[in-house]
Image: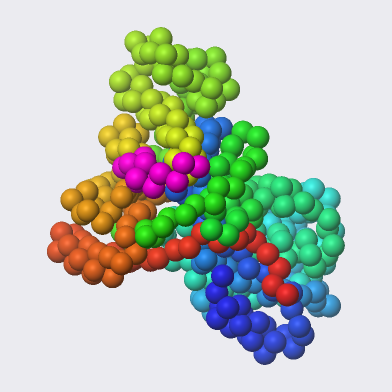
Amino acid sequence: MSKKLIKEVKGCFLDKFKVQPLIVFSPGRINLIGEHTDYNEGFTFPAAINKGIALAISKSNSNTSNAYALNKEELYAFKIENLKPLEGGGWRNYVLGVVAELQKIGKQIGNFNSIFAGNIPSGAGMSSSAALENSFVFGLNELFDLGLTKNEMILVSQKAEHNFAGVKCGIMDQYASMFGVKKSALLLDCRTVESRAYKINFKDYKLMLINSNIKHDLSESAYNDRREVCEKVSELLNISALRDASKDDLERIKTDITDEDYQKALYVINENIRVKKFSEAIKKDDIDALGDLLYQSHEGLSKKFKVSCKELDFLVNQTKTNPNVLGARMMGGGFGGCVIILLKKAEFKTFKKDTAKQFKKRFDKDCSVYSVKLSQGTLLIK
């Protein structure tokens, strides 16, 4: 977590509102493996990271509430009754959504003042929206003594995203941000919404994220399309989700579906298997196997599920001839965003410089490179 960010938010709050606030830090997340498996009630392997959102919040005696986005220098004052999503509301809708969803489950909230700032790179697939929702639900729960468990809080965050931001996300982002464990990733069962923390020793290696800084227009419609395909195949198999399908099951209906849909469903089945193999490799301390599974995951996302793009494929292919890299794959919904890479710590700077140069030469655009550590979940800063 960033002490600098927390200090900045607290200082700004004291300047503006002249009272001591509650401070919450809520992290972004990465997903090591298990992409597009969450809405198929399958398995994912997310982790909270050391970048996130710091929120300062206190009760207010005024008849409106205030939310101030420090990075954007935007203040939004609102009444907490009869809340509706705002057209093009951006970050405001996440805040309003959390308040409205708390009210829907019968929780009484008074007016409040809040200031937040974040250091999660935007559009990098590190779930800044989940971090923002979690920071507010956690802060309001504490401030107004709402008595919610962390499990109840993440459902409020998810509903805010569904009903106010209009994104039908799974639960993984909110879960990883809320429940993260230091130096660990969570093997998350998206059906039972239960997880087991696996402490990972990356030895001489570390995680690098490269943001392509590209977002192709396809991303939203393609996400909905992939979801529909998965639901359609599940229906044909007479199961509630692809998590319950085996390769043999899929073989039986192969002639009833298009080859494209067959490949997409096959990807999901294989990815669930890879997630479990990933957890086994961690237990065995087999870091080479982790890298290999990352490459397999990317191959499936690119060739079978078809959610990659030339920029992401380029970044992954760049790593394949480099002996200092164990594995890489695209991360997130696809059609842009980030690639996650497992590479030797000692080679980080050289690799960063070379890759940025190659990417610029090939696409005439800059990519951004980050180092991330696996971190703890949403917490109150004492």
In the image, is 14 to the left or to the right of 369?
Answer: right
- Residue 377, image x, y percentages: 62, 59
Residue found at the far front of this picture: 284
Location of residue 65 by image quarter: bottom right
286 left or right of 352 in image? right
- Which image quadrant is residue 207 in? bottom left
Q: Residue at x 40, y 29 (%)?
A: 270
Q: Which residue is outermost to the left?
A: 361
Q: Residue at x 15, y 59 (%)?
A: 362
Region rendered in magenta: 283-295
Q: Nearer the viewer, residue 274 or 77?
A: 274
Residue 151 coordinates in the image, percent (x, y) = 71, 47
Residue in front for this viewpoint, 312 or 183: 183
In-image side of 202 versus 95 (left or right): left
Task: Count all numbered tags in the image, as a single digit.
Answer: 0
The C terminus appears in which quarter of the rendering? bottom right
- Identify the image's colour scheme: rainbow, by chain, secondary structure or one colour: rainbow
Examine the structure image and report whether residue 161 is included in the region drawn in magenta: no
Residue 218 seen in this snapshot: no
Name the one closer to the observer, 199 or 78: 199
* Residue 289 belongs to magenta span: yes
Magenta highlight: main SS? helix
Image position of 210 with respect to 57: above or below: above
* Residue 131 percent coordinates (x, y): 58, 60
| Relative height, residue 221 to residue 66 (above, below) | above
